[in-house]
Amino acid sequence: MSASITTVSIWFIPVLIAFILMYATYKQVPTYETFVEGAKEGFDLAISIIPYLVGMLVAISVFRASGAMEALIEAVKPFLQAVGVPPEIVPLAMIRPISGTGALGMTTDLIATYGPDSFIGRLASTMQGSTDTTLYVLTVYFGAVGIKKMGDALKVGLLADIVGIIASILIVSYVFAY
């Protein structure tokens, strides 16, 4: 069973791309020209999001360098310990809605420090998969397409992140209780 899943996952993307190209050729769509036009639009979009990306990265750096994150962790540490949540997971929970790469780095760090089979390692991995980079998406992609009113999307995105964080804590606590 495992070998067949591995084979399917290795071949799925190339077969899908080949199918799309053959179908486009069958429908007489100029595939190469369409690809080049899409690549040009993608490049233009990448250039247009750079200011938003730089602004967000500067804000993250200032927040971490100022010591605000450490102060917040120390403030909530007694509460977290009382409910059985390791305080080491707080930076990941805070950074994940902001930066996927930063959160991945923190997850890697937590797994390297505590081990992949530890409660913290499992919780970090589950949290990484249960939340999204809400502020990154809003800042970069909404900014690139010119959406100015993003208040409702921000509320819903952050609510989904909070639910994902809480659910990951509850599920990992229940499934991997020692």
Image (spheres, helix red, strand yellow):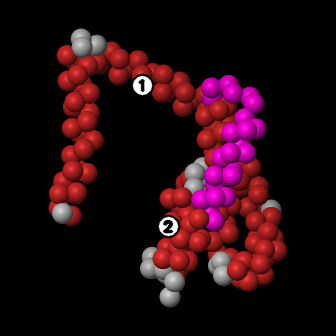
Please tell me which residue is depicted at 72% across the width and 35% down the height of the picture. Answer: 150
Residue range in magenta is: 144-166
Residue 36 higher or lower than 98, as above or below: above
Across and down, in percent, residue 24 comes to 26, 19
Residue 153 in magenta?
Answer: yes
> How many numbered dots are placed on residues in this image?
2
Residue 174 in magenta?
Answer: no
Instruction: Please rate how many residues cluster around mark 1, counting C-alpha atoms within 10 Å: few if below 14, some from 14 to 19, many from 20.
Output: few
| Label 1 sits on residue | 39
Instruction: Please rate how many residues cluster around mark 2, counting C-alpha atoms within 10 Å: few if below 14, some from 14 to 19, many from 20.
Output: some
Please tell me which residue is depicted at 61% across the width and 41% down the height of the picture. Answer: 137
Residue 124 higher or lower than 140, as above or below: below
Residue 80 higher or lower than 34, as above or below: below
Is residue 113 at least partly visible in the picture? Answer: no
Kindly indicate the quadrant of the structure image that contains residue 130: bottom right
Residue toward you, 85 or 88:
85
Residue 128 higher or lower than 109, as above or below: above
The amino acid at mark 2 is: Ser
Across and down, in percent, residue 145 comes to 62, 26
Kindly indicate the quadrant of the structure image that contains residue 131: bottom right
| Label 2 sits on residue | 125
